[in-house]
Image (cartoon, rainbow, N blue to C red):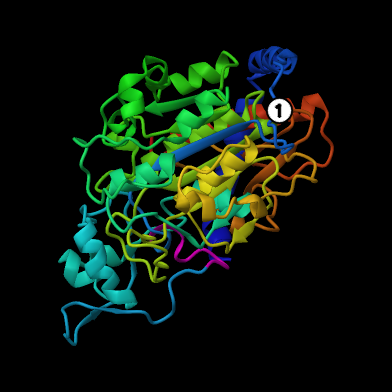
């Protein structure tokens, strides 16, 4: 109720401004009609996966450096921060530090997340070495719906995995290698000067005739492990599969989204890597997902959003040690698809190689290594018998007073909620009463209302941009 009362004080002025704006938007209505007609006329034949699963496009979005407890430790119903947990500030010391909310969008600092630090923090499974290993209380801070409300929206409407682990207790490169190859070849540091001879998922996709692309910031970035593979160095056709992250949007518009896409951060500022702004990273990811949802590819897509490593942040769940390299600490994983179960918190044990296993299952590919051969294929997160669900279109920028849909199961009028615009086949985050009809006119008015609210909130300082 606190959330609703805080929002209610702004309703009257925004309703008046919205009415004024709607009275002046006849031209926008005409443009919207043309746009919907054009969008609905686009139809591109799709290649079905050979497994019989109605997923033809797998998109893997990889962000940087956050644990599950750091992002979803207070998410309702999830295996989050235990009540009363506190970690020693010094080895064998009496002072302790409890988890605390970070009332800011920018992490105070980047904390150690090397192989050595991770194992000191793990401390033989006691999970008590985070504060004194990091030399900072920052490791105990956490974010919530105040900074990352749209990630919480995705969790409430699709699938949140709360038993998903990074693959290696260490930094980026070895975990990125597991994401594409199911192993790191013994690498536990960010050693980009090495050369690896084992295959990646892209070798398998290429040889099986399955289209793919790796969208990365640049060819030789810290988030692109492919240049360390001998097969890429020796094969120009594989190298052509590496493209700039900005090319994803144009590929979607051109109807050329590959069957498998890996998407790395466009640049450091949207990576969520401390000390970068986590809200800016969230907004960038939402923009990517919105593009997919608005496209012809939505009905055949599965989108995975995960974070490469733990980034030095605290997590309370001891990672199972399946081999001498991992697992590493828990990281979030969101699964978004028209076939994803709604509001499902998935407790299945998984790691980055489970995404590989899903790709291998969908496209009938052989396992790459022991880790992905034994991994869960994540099919429990889907219900392929259900009618494909409409997309959830979220705002492209952070809305300071947006409360995740988790808290608004029975929202009153004029409170932000997801509105089912049935005639356009999408769900739009808006300030409105849920509609039960769905003719074209009401859906267009709803879409225009969103634009009006954006303009009003920007003018009256409700949004931060």
Quickly name the residue at label 1. Answer: 48
Q: Is residue 379 above or below residue 463?
A: below
Q: Is residue 292 left or right of residue 65?
A: right
Q: Secondary structure at mark 1?
A: loop
Residue 336 or residue 41, whichever sits in front: 336
Q: Which residues are magenta?
A: 70-78
Q: Is residue 397 at least partly visible in the picture? A: no
Q: Position of residue 398 (x, y in %)?
A: 44, 41
Displayed quadrant of residue 358? top right
State the residue at coordinates (33%, 71%).
Answer: 99
Displayed quadrant of residue 439? top right
Residue 118 or residue 395, whichever sits in front: 118
Q: Residues within 10 Å of mark 1 (few under 14, many from 20)?
A: some
Q: Position of residue 381 (x, y in %)?
A: 64, 52
Q: Which quarter of the rendered picture does the C terminus lie within?
A: top left
Q: Is residue 240 at least partly visible in the picture? A: yes
State the residue at coordinates (59%, 50%).
Answer: 377
SS assignment for the magenta stretch, majority: loop
Q: Is residue 124 left or right of residue 434?
A: left
Residue 354 or residue 338, whichever sits in front: 354
> Is 72 covered by the magenta stretch?
yes
Residue 137 or residue 245, whichever sits in front: 245
State the residue at coordinates (71%, 27%).
Answer: 48
Total tally of numbered discs in the picture: 1
Q: Which quarter of the rendered picture does the N terminus lie within?
A: bottom right
Q: Position of residue 21 (x, y in %)?
A: 60, 27
State the residue at coordinates (40%, 67%).
Answer: 319
């Amino acid at each position: 109720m606190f959330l609703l009362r805080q929002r209610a004080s702004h309703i009257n002025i925004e309703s008046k401004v919205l009415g004024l704006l709607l009275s002046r938007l006849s031209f926008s209505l005409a443009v919207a009609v043309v746009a919907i007609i054009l969008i609905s006329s686009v139809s591109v034949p799709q290649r079905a996966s050979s497994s019989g699963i109605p997923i033809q496009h797998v998109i893997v979005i990889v962000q940087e450096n956050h644990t599950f407890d750091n992002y979803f430790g207070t998410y309702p119903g999830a295996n989050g921060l235990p009540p009363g947990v506190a970690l020693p500030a010094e080895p064998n010391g009496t002072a302790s530090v409890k988890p605390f909310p970070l009332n800011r969008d920018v992490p105070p600092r980047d904390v150690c997340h090397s192989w050595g630090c991770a194992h000191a923090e793990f401390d033989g499974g006691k999970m008590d070495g985070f504060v004194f290993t990091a030399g900072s209380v920052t490791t105990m801070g956490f974010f919530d719906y105040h900074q990352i409300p749209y990630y919480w929206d995705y969790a409430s409407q699709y699938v949140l995995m709360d038993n998903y682990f990074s693959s290696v207790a260490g930094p980026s490169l070895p975990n990125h290698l597991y994401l594409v190859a199911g192993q790191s070849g013994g690498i536990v540091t960010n050693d980009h000067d090495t050369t690896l001879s084992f295959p990646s998922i892209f070798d398998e996709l290429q040889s099986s005739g399955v289209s793919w692309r790796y969208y990365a910031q640049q060819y030789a970035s810290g988030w692109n492990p492919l240049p360390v593979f001998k097969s890429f160095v020796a094969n120009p056709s594989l190298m052509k599969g590496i493209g700039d992250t900005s090319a994803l949007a144009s590929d979607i518009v051109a109807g050329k989204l590959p069957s498998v896409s890996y998407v790395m951060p466009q640049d450091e500022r949207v990576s969520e890597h401390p000390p970068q702004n986590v809200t800016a990273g969230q907004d960038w990811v939402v923009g990517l997902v919105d593009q997919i949802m608005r496209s012809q590819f939505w009905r055949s897509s599965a989108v995975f959003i995960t974070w490469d490593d733990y980034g030095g942040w605290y997590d309370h769940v001891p990672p199972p040690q399946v081999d001498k390299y991992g697992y590493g600490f828990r990281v979030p994983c969101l699964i978004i698809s028209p076939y994803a179960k709604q509001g499902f918190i998935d407790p299945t044990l998984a790691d980055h190689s489970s995404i590989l296993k899903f790709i291998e299952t969908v496209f009938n590919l052989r396992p790459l290594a022991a880790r992905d051969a034994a991994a869960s294929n994540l099919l429990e997160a889907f219900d392929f018998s259900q009618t494909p669900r409409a997309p959830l279109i979220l705002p492209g920028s952070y809305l300071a007073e947006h409360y995740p849909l988790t808290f608004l199961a029975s929202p009153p009028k004029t409170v932000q909620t997801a509105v089912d615009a049935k005639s356009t086949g999408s769900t739009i985050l808006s300030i409105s009463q849920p509609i039960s009809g769905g003719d074209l006119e009401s859906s267009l008015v709803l879409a225009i209302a969103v634009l009006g609210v954006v303009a009003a909130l920007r003018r009256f300082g409700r949004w931060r941009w």
